[in-house]
């Protein structure tokens, strides 16, 4: 690989890691922020929510803007905005200031997430796209997984401000690498191509890819929403043991991302998508029947490994099917579908667990286990629906 490609990939990987880290690192600081600003938990929660809402609100527009103004140019601007916002967060004299700065940080992260996927096709050859998609999936998982651990160390050593200040030099480093190594932008896309893009949005294949991304993300979110209750109330684990068990999922995602990209290269994005969904289905089915910590963790490992393969394959299929001029917008849509899936999983699958486990405070371990089984029975239904969409997409693309 050329040095320019390698440097460009480091910039894209760091951008993806920082955006994911920004989501997870702030959670560990919420108790300290409550004390520092003498605020309620509900008020300090907006430090997390403002970041997520900003990403969800603007990520498609950020992708579209990158297609118009230049993806490299916009990625560098997003990284600089992210770094500036990190500094503003660290200097916040009040909670409203911090929430406003986190909103700015979310805007920068939205640009980074949209441009990172969009620039894969500009940075590496088509034959290496799946491998790089797997790498970026790994970096996203690493950022999510390392947030609580790194955040805890920073919090204990330097206080809550360090949680945000750490992103500033890393953002500047990623921007410098992008300036040096990412390919120069092509001329802006003429307005006349807009109609062609909206026609491409009506592609059944693209719609299927976005819908599958949302469905599968909802299932993964259920492990974070329902898992802690099963581990604590169902298996009576102490907080430290529960934290270790909860880290297994992101850890598996971090380890399997690059191999998932290689499998996608070997078998093709369509077969690999179906393979990933089949592995996920077996993991969800196992969670419907699980009893005890060992079977729970085994099921979680299977589910997460299948998700890594699905994500690398589906992202490759979606991004390879769109013309170069509109990669930014489709990358934004892909990220939006994932975020909406996470919201759906937290609300609908969480509601399913609450409905099947009444009076959770005094629930017996068996009733909590019953709630877990019912929730993942619904999750299995979502995976089967995604499988049907993947099967239809493959059938449509098969030559007659």
Image: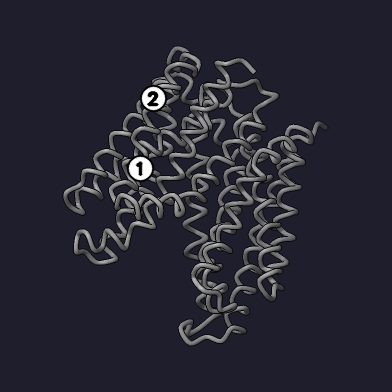
SS category of the residue bearing label 1: helix
Question: Which label was assigned to residue 106?
Answer: 1
Front-lying residue, 341 or 36: 36
**Residue shown at the point (74%, 47%) measured from the top left:** 274
SS category of the residue bearing label 2: helix
**Residue shown at the point (45%, 22%) measured from the top left:** 177
**Residue farthest toward the front in the current orientation of the protein:** 157
- Left or right, 172 with respect to 271, comes to left
Q: Is residue 86 above or below residue 7?
A: below
Work out which quarter of the rendered image holds the N terminus and state it.
top right
**Residue farthest toward the left in the current orientation of the protein:** 93
Front-lying residue, 23 or 93: 93
Residue 241 coordinates in the image, percent (x, y):
55, 68
Work out which quarter of the rendered image holds the C terminus and state it.
top right
Mark sitting earlier along the chain (2/1): 2
Residue 108 visible in the displayed image: yes
Front-lying residue, 322 or 101: 101
Question: Which label was assigned to residue 16?
Answer: none
**Residue farthest toward the right in the current orientation of the protein:** 400
Residue 346 coordinates in the image, percent (x, y):
48, 62
Front-lying residue, 227 or 62: 227
**Residue shown at the point (44%, 32%) measured from the top left:** 63
Quadrant in the picture for residue 172: top left
Question: Which label was assigned to residue 76?
Answer: 2
Q: Is residue 57 above or below residue 80?
A: below
Residue 75 visible in the displayed image: no
Residue 221 coordinates in the image, percent (x, y):
54, 58
**Residue shown at the point (63%, 67%) measured from the top left:** 378
Residue 222 coordinates in the image, percent (x, y):
55, 63
Q: Residues within 10 Å of mark 2 (few under 14, many from 20)?
A: many
- Left or right, 297 with respect to 19, comes to right
Q: Is residue 241 above or below residue 88?
A: below
């Amino acid at each position: 690989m050329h040095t320019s490609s390698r440097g460009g990939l480091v910039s894209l990987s760091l951008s993806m890691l920082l955006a994911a880290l920004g989501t997870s690192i702030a959670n560990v600081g919420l108790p300290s922020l409550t004390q520092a600003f003498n605020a309620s938990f509900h008020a300090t929660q907006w430090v997390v929510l403002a970041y997520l809402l900003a990403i969800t609100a603007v990520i498609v527009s950020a992708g579209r803007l990158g297609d118009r103004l230049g993806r490299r140019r916009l990625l560098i601007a997003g990284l600089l905005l992210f770094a500036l916002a990190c500094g503003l967060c660290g200097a916040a004299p009040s909670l409203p200031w911090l929430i406003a700065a986190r909103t700015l940080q979310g805007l920068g992260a939205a640009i980074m997430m949209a441009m990172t996927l969009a620039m894969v096709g500009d940075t590496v050859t088509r034959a290496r796209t799946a491998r790089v998609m797997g790498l970026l999936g790994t970096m996203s998982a690493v950022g999510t997984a390392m947030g609580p651990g790194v955040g805890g160390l920073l919090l204990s050593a330097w206080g809550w401000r360090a949680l945000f200040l750490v992103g500033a030099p890393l953002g500047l480093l990623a921007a410098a690498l992008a300036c040096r190594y990412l390919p120069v932008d092509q001329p802006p896309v003429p307005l006349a191509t807009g109609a062609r893009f909206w026609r491409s949005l009506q592609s059944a294949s693209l719609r299927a890819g976005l819908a599958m991304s949302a469905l599968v993300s909802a299932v993964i979110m259920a492990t974070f929403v329902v898992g802690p209750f099963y581990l604590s109330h169902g298996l009576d684990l102490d907080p430290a043991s529960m934290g270790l068990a909860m880290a297994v999922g992101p850890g598996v995602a971090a380890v399997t991302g690059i191999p998932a990209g290689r499998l996608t290269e070997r078998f093709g994005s369509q077969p690999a998508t179906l393979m990933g969904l089949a592995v996920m289905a077996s993991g969800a089915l196992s969670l419907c029947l699980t009893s005890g910590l060992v079977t729970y963790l085994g099921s979680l490992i299977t589910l997460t490994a299948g998700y890594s393969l699905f994500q690398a394959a589906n992202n490759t299929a979606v991004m390879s099917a769109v013309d170069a001029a509109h990669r930014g917008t489709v990358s934004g849509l892909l990220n939006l579908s994932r975020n909406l899936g996470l919201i759906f999983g937290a609300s609908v699958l969480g509601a399913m667990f609450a409905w099947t486990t009444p009076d959770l405070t005094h629930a017996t371990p068996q009733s909590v286990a019953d709630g877990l089984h019912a929730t993942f029975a619904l999750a299995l239904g979502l995976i089967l629906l995604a499988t049907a969409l993947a099967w239809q997409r493959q059938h449509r693309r098969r030559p007659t």
